[in-house]
Image (cartoon, rainbow, N blue to C red):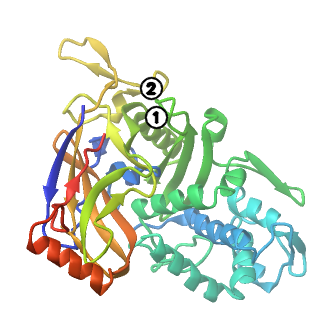
């Protein structure tokens, strides 16, 4: 059952956004990696994290950005996946011990093959070849990569090469790489066509995908592995599974694990974190598409009340973990998809996910009224979602407000009616509607 509380903020346009609490409190010592995060792209909420803002070497997870830009160019009609490119001397910058397709200058290759080589083979010569084609030179492409990172909100990221070679000024974080994974899977979903391929061969060079979870879990379809001695073993993982509710779309999660001790551990850790999140969290519709949130009185216009409404459905991720105790990832049975708890007497029991969640929402209006004429994008309300008295989600409701001013004669009659208190007037209070 949801309890709706309306909080009014008079004559205030700006409302600060509060950081949301993570949903699952996982004991960091039970997770064998230096940094990690679980992100729900549908709601944008972080489910759990540790050291997620610590800058680290991303290694070949860098190539997700190269592919993201290339696929954006394809979607914009500036690049064609069937286009045949001629490899240039730039491929000679790739060293013998780096992952590569073994391209030679003047060799012909399609954009489609380069994308497969980039994502499946993690080929550095594919990265520099695409960079040069898109931005004329690798240095120009680095500018583009960092611009895209800033646009995506990757505030603790700086790219210095397209392949992920270790450099002092080449770094990212688990949180930022999860944002990139979110953008890749939602804005350029064709990426997943490549990242779910379990092998790729080019010119007799065969490569088996290093994301071993592609074979173990049919719901896994990406995203990228990476390794250097400095970075350790990194993995950006995503999967798409049916939602718990029949009327909800398939649910996708993104997990980023950085600095694991080996390839098997990074896969095991990422898979456990993902399965735990699928089992003990779920998505719910917080606000329906076109749902009326409030009505604001309008001054100096024939329109008396302006409807504040959601322009699209908004989702929230809620916790299904019943206990207040910290979660030990070692107690999660990956096969049963459940936490197994053991009491002081050695008796084991299965901790089942909650079937119902208790949330409440606070609605804060940014203003109590609107005065015509208006023609601008405005933040009209802020909705804060709480579960167990913790803020878990915040929605900002904005709209392109266009209200024409009434004629001087209409304004005069309106003033006259108010003067003699005839009927309803524009001083009616703002009204907030319950959210269900």
Residue 218 vertical position relative to residue 155 in the rendered view, above or below: above
> Label 1 crowding class (10 Å Cα cut-off): few <14, some 14-19, many 20+?
many
- Pinpoint residue 431: horizontal percent, then vertical percent: 21, 55
List the residue tagged with mark 2: 337
Q: How many marks?
A: 2
Q: Residue at x 71, y 81 (%)?
A: 134
- Pinpoint residue 187: horizontal percent, then vertical percent: 59, 61
List the residue tagged with mark 1: 275
Q: Is residue 328 left or right of residue 332?
A: left
Q: Quadrant of the N terminus?
A: top left
The foreground one among 232 and 378 is 378
Residue 325 vertical position relative to residue 197 in the rendered view, above or below: above
Quadrant in which residue 297 is drawn: bottom left
> Label 2 crowding class (10 Å Cα cut-off): few <14, some 14-19, many 20+?
some
Q: Residue at x 43, y 64 (%)?
A: 176
Tag 1 near tag 2, CB within 8 Å: yes
- Pinpoint residue 279: horizontal percent, then vertical percent: 41, 31
Provide the secondary structure element on which disc 1 rests: helix
Task: Of the two numbered discs 1 and 2 on the same chain, state the one appearing first in sequence.
Answer: 1
Furthest-left residue in this view: 420
Quadrant in which residue 109 is drawn: bottom right
Residue 22 vertical position relative to residue 145 in the rendered view, above or below: above
Provide the secondary structure element on which disc 2 rests: loop
- How far, Cα to Cα, is label 1 from label 2? 6 Å
Task: Using the rendered image of the protein, determine whether residue 3 is visible from the camera's viewpoint.
Answer: yes
Task: Using the rendered image of the protein, determine whether residue 206 is visible from the camera's viewpoint.
Answer: no
- Pinpoint residue 311: horizontal percent, then vertical percent: 44, 58
Residue 216 vertical position relative to residue 344 in the rendered view, above or below: below
Q: Residue at x 55, y 39 (%)?
A: 250
């Amino acid at each position: 059952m949801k309890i709706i509380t309306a909080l009014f903020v008079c004559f205030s346009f700006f409302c600060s956004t509060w950081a949301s609490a993570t949903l699952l409190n996982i004991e960091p010592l039970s997770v064998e990696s230096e940094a990690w995060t679980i992100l729900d792209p549908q709601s944008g909420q972080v489910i759990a994290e540790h050291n997620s803002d610590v800058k680290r070497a991303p290694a070949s997870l860098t190539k997700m950005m190269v592919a993201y830009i290339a696929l954006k160019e394809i979607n914009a009609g500036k690049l064609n996946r069937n286009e045949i490119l001629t490899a240039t001397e730039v491929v000679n910058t790739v060293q013998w011990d780096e992952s590569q397709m073994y391209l030679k200058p003047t060799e012909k290759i399609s954009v489609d093959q380069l994308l497969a080589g980039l994502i499946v083979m993690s080929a550095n010569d594919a990265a520099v070849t695409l960079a040069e084609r898109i931005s004329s030179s690798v240095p120009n492409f680095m500018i583009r990569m960092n611009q895209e990172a800033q646009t995506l909100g990757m505030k603790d990221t700086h790219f210095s090469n397209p392949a992920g070679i270790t450099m002092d000024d080449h770094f990212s974080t688990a949180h930022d790489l999860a944002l990139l994974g979110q953008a890749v899977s939602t804005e350029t979903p064709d990426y997943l066509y490549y990242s779910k391929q379990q092998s790729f061969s080019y010119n007799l060079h065969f490569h088996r995908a290093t994301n071993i979870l592609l074979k173990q879990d049919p719901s896994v379809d990406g995203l990228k592995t990476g390794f250097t001695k400095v970075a350790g073993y990194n993995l950006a993982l995503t999967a798409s599974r049916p939602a718990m509710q029949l009327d909800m779309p398939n649910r996708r999660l993104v997990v980023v694990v950085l600095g694991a001790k080996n390839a098997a551990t990074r896969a095991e850790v990422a898979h456990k974190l993902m399965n735990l999140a699928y089992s003990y969290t779920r998505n719910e519709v917080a606000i329906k598409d076109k749902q009326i949130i409030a009505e604001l009185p309008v001054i100096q216009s024939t329109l008396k009340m302006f409807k504040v409404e959601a322009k699209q459905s908004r989702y929230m991720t809620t916790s299904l973990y019943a206990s207040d105790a910290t979660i030990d990832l070692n107690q999660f049975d990956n096969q049963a998809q459940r936490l197994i708890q053991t009491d002081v007497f050695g008796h084991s029991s299965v901790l089942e996910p909650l079937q119902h969640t208790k949330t409440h929402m606070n609605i804060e209006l940014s203003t109590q009224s609107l005065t015509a004429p208006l023609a601008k994008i405005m933040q009209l309300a802020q909705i804060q979602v709480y579960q167990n008295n913790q803020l878990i989600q915040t929605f900002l409701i904005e709209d392109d407000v266009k209200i024409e001013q009434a004629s001087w004669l209409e304004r005069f009659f309106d003033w006259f009616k108010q003067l003699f208190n005839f009927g309803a007037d524009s001083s009616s209070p703002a009204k907030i509607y319950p959210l269900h």
